[in-house]
Image (cartoon, rainbow, N blue to C red):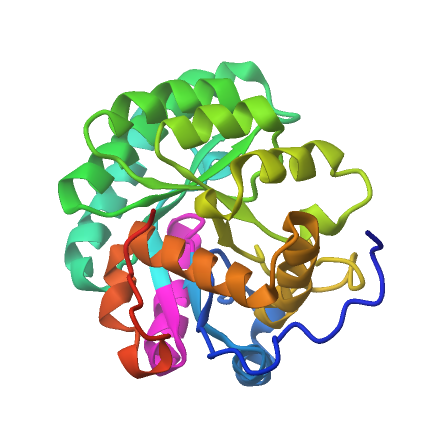
Amino acid sequence: MGEEGVSGWMDEGDQPVPVIDTHAHLFLDVFSGDLPEVLARAHAEGVRYCLMPNIDMGTLKALLAVSERYADQGCLPMVGLHPLSVPDSEDRLREVLSVLEKEVDRFLDRWIAIGEVGMDLYRVDREVLPLQQEALDVQCQWAIRYDLPVSVHTRGAFREAMDILERWARQGLRGVLHCFTGGREEARRACTAGFYLGIGGIVTFRNAGALREAIRYVGLDRLVLETDAPFLAPVPHRGKRNEPAYLKYVIRYLADLLGCSTWEVRAQTTRNALGVFTRLQQYIDASVLPEDWSGSAG
């Protein structure tokens, strides 16, 4: 399967299915000059909803502003503290989490998920481990309390993060391992705990063999689509600014990888996303969904 020549992602004669980008930072400055055009291109490619994960208290204002201005275009916000934004002291961490929880309560009806949360020990001193563990643990509690899923970032800390996630999963926690890059064993552990794998542009990279093996192992039933825009653009746009419209390349690649149609990729990943991000179901127009559609994740 090549990395070039991707085209024609819509199957002729298939019923249209709204595609969901489950992770896109459209509130960042890199999109401030042309976000309406970015969203128009996304909609032209069938990407109707973009779920936007927060980073820290400094990004919350921009996140909420974009989600309010472009709510009718499918921009829906998450709330959370990114692991690389976790403060370096316990007192400061608890202060930040206390303030952030007030924002969770204040805009409770608007949040689609708790995110972006998780753990990241890549090129980071392991002394931060206890603080990242506490931050993830507290935010998993929020997710349970408010019946929201989590969007989880893990880098260099899969085992440590899963130790916490599995404990909360036994109490009903659901969510997505965003930007999943692990292999078969990591995929097995995550999916056994009930989590879904967020798949984006990395699957098109030549060095992503272990990820492709993991995807073949779990199949479409445990996948959701994401861009992580503006990061990690797929081939043939690797190295450039990523945007939701580029999900068409990921969809085609997954269809080729799994030996199915692009319609099947769109339909199953959207079904999965609706089952995880349950608040999405209030936004989906049933008239655009195939007959006998079920929004529950299998």
The image quarter containing residue 135 is: top left
Q: Is residue 282 above or below residue 212?
A: below
Q: Main secondary structure of the magenta part?
A: helix
Residue 184: horizontal and vertical position, in percent? Answer: 59, 27
| Residue 87 visible in rendering | no
Q: Residue at x 61, y 72 (%)?
A: 245
Q: With 80 as the anchor, is 242 left or right in this view?
A: right
Residue closest to the eye, 198 or 243: 198
Does the segment drawn in magenta span residue 65? yes
Q: Start and end of the magenta stretch?
A: 53-76
Q: How many numbered marks does the figure carry?
A: 0
Q: With 123 as the anchor, is 266 left or right in this view?
A: left
The image quarter containing residue 88 is: top left
Residue 173: horizontal and vertical position, in percent? Answer: 26, 35
Q: With 41 as the anchor, is 5 left or right in this view?
A: right
Residue 290: horizontal and vertical position, in percent? Answer: 37, 75
Residue 266: horizontal and vertical position, in percent? Answer: 51, 64
Q: Residue at x 83, y 56 (%)?
A: 3
Does the segment drawn in magenta span residue 108? no
The image quarter containing residue 134 is: top left
Q: Residue at x 60, y 63 (%)?
A: 261
Q: Residue at x 30, y 25 (%)?
A: 91
| Residue 265 visible in rendering | yes
